[in-house]
Amino acid sequence: MPIVILLACVVIAFAIGAVSGADHIVDDDAGSWRTHSTIQDAINDSAEFDTVHVYAGTYQENVIVNQTIDLIGNGTDTIINGSFAGDTVYIDSDRVNMSYFHVTGGSSRGIYMDGDYLWVHNLTVNDSVSSGIYMKRFWSTVDNCTVSDTRYGLEIIWTQWHTVKESHFENNERSGLNLGNAFDMELYNNTFLNCGLRVSGSSENAYTSHIIEDCSVDGRPILYMSEAENVTVPAGAGQVIVTGSANVTVEDQYLHNSSYGLIIGYSKHMTVRDCTLDDQYISAWIEKVDNSVFEDVRINRIDDNGLYFTQCERITVEDCNATNTWGERPLYISTDSWNFHVVNFSATDFWAGMVVYGDGTVIENSTLWLNSYGIYIGDDNITIRNNNVYNCQFGIYGSLVEWINITNNSVHGCSNHGIWFQSVENATITYNEIFDNSGYGIRLSSAGIWNNHIHHNNFADNGGAHVDTEGTHDTYDDGVSEGNYWDDWDGNGTYEVDGGNGEDRYPLSDPVNTTAPEKIPGIHLLLGVSSVMVVAAVFRRRWKP
């Protein structure tokens, strides 16, 4: 019996020794045969379950961890600098433990975690181009790390069952933590400063399957609501994420500097009102949402987009406004969305006041000024009416579109063309005030200009021709008796459209009475004077003594 016990103890001791492994020392001032001067040399010299201890110092190298080891530094004084020559650290094995390092200088990622059951903790990661840490595979943990000054602090893409806890993300350009088509993530006690959390995916489960608890942006809570119904989100959030929900109201929120202030995915009958979205990469990311209302949303200072809608339908955007000192598009409606109603939207100082690809969208009573493009459209069946678009580079622009209806708008003061279409068919442009644009009033260019109807518009003081077209099958009158008012028509015969590709057979001697928000200065007085003269003449005829 004692012999059996002794043999068992020997077996256990051998097993423990095998799992514990040997120790390897790395010192950039190495002068002993017992130490290594580079981390990679120590890893290459190690076996499964060994431990590599790295002394304080700066190690200019790109490290590949290709076997199960413990890689332990001496804290922030142990620096691995990839010198922007690739991923600084690439973990290509399972059950690796990496801790107590400062990792920097990845040309793509600081740490690429490409194994299962990995544990990285007590790390400082910064100054990598794409992401500080990138997680793939399954069942890994990021714990007590600080990740800053990258495009994405931590990216978790197309993977499942990871945990991120007790970590801090700061000054990451597009988001501190990016969950893209990730499932069953657990996030606990993480803090964000000047960045926040992003959740997105091509399925509802990518939005709804997470546990997100006790996380905050700039000291205010991240409110993550999954599969909620008939509730109002409490005020005072740092970031709001609503997924798989119905009849949820988001109101009275000031969402500041959290990368994506508001995220709504796979939800319906949402109401968002009286909110300010300030200093964001994208103010609000809305995916797979229908029958919802966004009203009185104020968008200030964006890097990319304001309200971004993708795969959404039957949405009303009302009484929203956007101001900027930089940024691209305060309102973006993607090509896989439809049936939007945009009313009383205002935007100034953007690349485009709004970009609309959603089929069946109606844009009305909105004001767009001082943008490169006032309204930019890229889909069919869009109605633009009663808007004031001015002092832009291009007022209204569209490409490869058809069945567009533009009516009762004021388009003026643009440094290039008032309205410009590249390839447009079956458009109707009527009752607009088009004036004082430095280029053409309307420019129709490229192939595919066909069967457009332009009549009952007022044209005045445009720098180029009022209309310049490459199309040969468009009409410039109603086909009966009335065309457009052209301030340079000499009063005789027809009006030839610039380029010789069309004519207005019935040009009008008096301005058209439109309901556009801003009229051409001066010319409508003529209409009033002539009307008074007609009334006076009738009066004299009736009461002639």
Image (cartoon, rainbow, N blue to C red):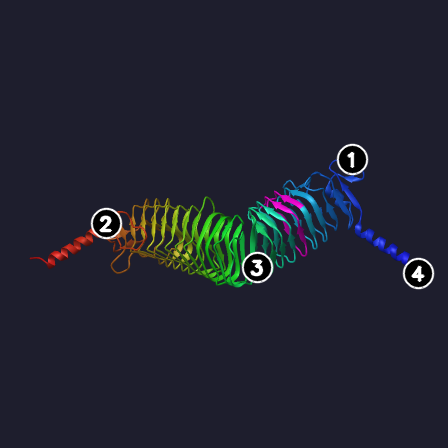
* Amino acid on which disc 3 is placed: Tyr
List x then y, in percent, for residue 265. 53, 59
- The kind of residue tagged 1 is Gly
Of mark 4 and mark 1, the one earlier in the sequence is: 4
Q: Amino acid at mark 4?
A: Met
Secondary structure type for disc 4: loop
Which residue is disc 3 drawn over? 207
Q: Which residues make up the magenta segment?
A: 123-150
Please indicate, yes or no, whether residue 108 appears anywhere in the rendered image: no
Contact check, label 3 and label 2, Cβ < 8 Å: no
Depth order, front residue of 528/260: 260
Query: Which residue is identified by label 2?
Result: 525
Q: Residue at x 38, y 53 (%)?
A: 366
Circle 2 residues within 10 Å: few <14, some 14–19, many ≥20: few
* Most foreground residue, 506 or 323: 323
Instruction: Measure the C-alpha gap from mark 4 to mark 3.
Output: 60 Å
Q: Is residue 133 magenta?
A: yes
Q: CB under 8 Å between callouts 1 and 2?
A: no
Circle 4 is placed at which residue position?
1
User: Mark 1 — residue?
Assistant: 31
Please state the horizontal and vertical placement of residue 494, each as a whole percent of the image: 25, 53
User: If you read the primary sequence from the N terminus, does the residue marked by circle 3 or circle 1 appear first?
Assistant: 1
Mark-to-mark CA distance, 3 and 2: 59 Å
Q: Is residue 106 left or right of residue 272?
A: right
